[in-house]
Image (tube, helix red, strand yellow):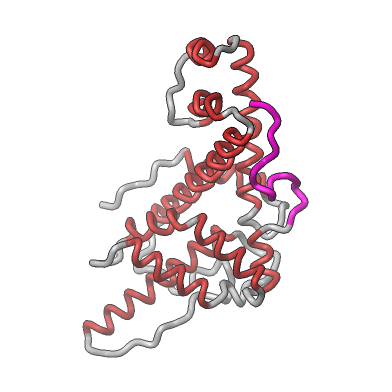
Amino acid sequence: MGSAKPVNPDASSPFVTTRWSRVLAARGDSENARAALSDLCAAYYDPVVAFIARVGCGPDDPRDVAHEFFAALLRQGGPGGVVPGRGRFRSYLLAAVRHHLANRRRHAARTKRGGDVEHQPLPSEGDTDPGTPLAAPAADWEALFDREWALAIVERSLSVMALEAEASGAAAEFAALRPWLSAEATPEPQSAAALRLGMSEGAVKVAIHRLRRRFREQVRSEIRQTLPDDADAEGELRHLIAALAVRAATPG
């Protein structure tokens, strides 16, 4: 695949200021922090939509509810009360969306009774504190969120690698070898890929090995952006792998 420079500037060094640490350090009071929070929200919109769709939001469209949630999060500038250096964006986001859904359910209940409602802010007491929980929360929902989160990390990593391959003139090679990066795909025989690419089987094996190594590096880079520092990136990577192995239960 060659040695093209990573498209993602944050992937070039492990000693970086992560997007989440920028948000925590500035508490949303700077343009830099707001931009970092906006990037994170855009990147992990789909896991929130999937979670809302599974948990349920009444007659409303899950994407509309997700848009409402992220708009509130960005308007407030993020986690004003979170202690810097503590917690993952994944944990904060799940807690915040659960809190938001609980507020919506209280509002719907009070409206049905004819009463008004005072909107409560998104949780600021801690990024791992779920605030007011959803009624009868189930571990299955958290497993679903983590799986969708992991899928988002994988898709973002593959997108970066596709751009790298295109920039280095190796788009066809990447497209042919990409199935070897997926646990769910069934790649063609390496001999067939070699024939199609005009390479030897040995060269294809080497290319797949390099591609997998680059993929793992890029996944780590994406993960780092959601942590307060680089200390637990390996632990988060193991959690991501475990989440991908779990099929979320369908509610009965």
Q: Is residue 118 left or right of residue 41?
A: left
Say which residue appears at 63% left-offset and 36% top-offset.
216
Q: Which residues are magenta?
A: 1-16
In what quadrant of the picture does the N terminus appear? top right
Residue 55 on image: x %, y %: 33, 60
Say which residue appears at 29% left-offset and 52% top-offset.
251
Residue lying at the far right of the rendered structure: 15
Residue 6 within the segment the image draws in magenta: yes
Does 6 appear above or below 46?
A: above
Residue lying at the far bottom of the rendered structure: 115
Does 65 appear above or below 248?
A: below
Residue 122 on image: x %, y %: 49, 75
Q: Which sits in the foreground, 178 or 124?
A: 178
Q: Is residue 34 left or right of residue 84?
A: left
Say which residue appears at 49% left-offset and 50% top-offset.
149
Residue 200 within the segment the image draws in magenta: no
Please tell me in which quadrant of the rendered image residue 29 appears. bottom right
Residue 148 on image: x %, y %: 44, 49
Does 128 appear above or below 7?
A: below
Please tell me in which quadrant of the rendered image residue 246 appears. top left
Q: Which sits in the foreground, 57 or 142?
A: 57
Does 44 appear above or below 73?
A: above
How many circles with numbers are drawn on the protein?
0
Say which residue appears at 51% left-offset and 10% top-offset.
195
Residue 75 on image: x %, y %: 51, 76
Examine the residues drawn in magenta and state their main secondary structure.
loop
